[in-house]
Amino acid sequence: MRTIKRDIVGAFILSSDNKLLLGKSHKGGVYTGSWIVPGGGVDEGETKLDALKREVLEETGINITDAKVEQVEGALTGESEKTLRDTGERVLVDMSFYNFVIRLPKTSNEVITKTEDDFVEATWFSTDKLKGLTMSPPTVLTLQKLGYVNE
């Protein structure tokens, strides 16, 4: 199996009523079956912030241009198998994650999401209800770092 390396941006989107937006990968995507945050690969020549804005808009329909955005210190790594859409080839993706916290000025009920890309089943979770969810390892590690999930 071929391995591809990717820099990935992840969006920990919090509403003003302190809910976190999680979803799942489309069938064949990375971390299938686990709750993940929206995000995706950084294209060549693109900054991480530009990639974040593009990926969040593509995956959720949310424009974060006016939101408060902070990068989480330190990169995480992970790997997962994935089926490439254009060729159907199954590959191992070796990823470096650069995560960001995005604070929206609206409540979760006011935020309209539309999932049309790799991110499906978009659901808002109260941050005190995250324990016990099956989440991808990088999502869990970042939520631990942010103090939302205990180790």
Image (tube, rainbow, N blue to C red):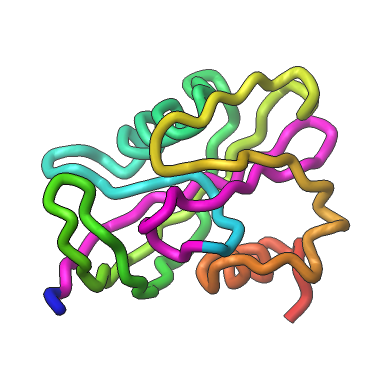
Question: Is residue 76 depicted above or below 112 in this figure?
Answer: below
| Residue 71 visible in rendering | no
Q: Which of 62 and 99 is in front in this view?
A: 62
Q: Nearer the viewer, residue 19 or 85?
A: 85
The stretch drawn in magenta includes residue 4? yes
The C terminus lies in which quarter of the figure? Answer: bottom right
Image side of residue 115 versus residue 147, left or right: left
Question: Is residue 80 depicted above or below 28 in this figure?
Answer: below
The stretch drawn in magenta includes residue 91? no
Name the dominant secondary structure of the magenta segment.
Answer: strand
Where is residue 75 shown, x and y percent of the image?
A: 40, 66
Identify which residue is drawn at 38% across, 73% down. 77
Q: How many marks?
A: 0
Where is residue 127 shown, x and y percent of the image?
A: 81, 52
Identify which residue is drawn at 59% across, 47% down. 23
The N terminus lies in which quarter of the figure? Answer: bottom left
Res 67 → quadrant:
top right
| Residue 129 visible in rendering | yes
Identify which residue is drawn at 18% across, 55% down. 88
Where is residue 109 shown, x and y percent of the image?
A: 80, 23
Image side of residue 81 versus residue 98, left or right: left
Image side of residue 17 versus residue 37, left or right: right
Identify which residue is drawn at 16% across, 74% down. 3
Q: Which of 139 and 67 is in front in this view?
A: 139
Question: Is residue 25 depicted above or below 145 in this figure?
Answer: above
Magenta stretch: give its range: 3-32
Res 90 → quadrant:
bottom left
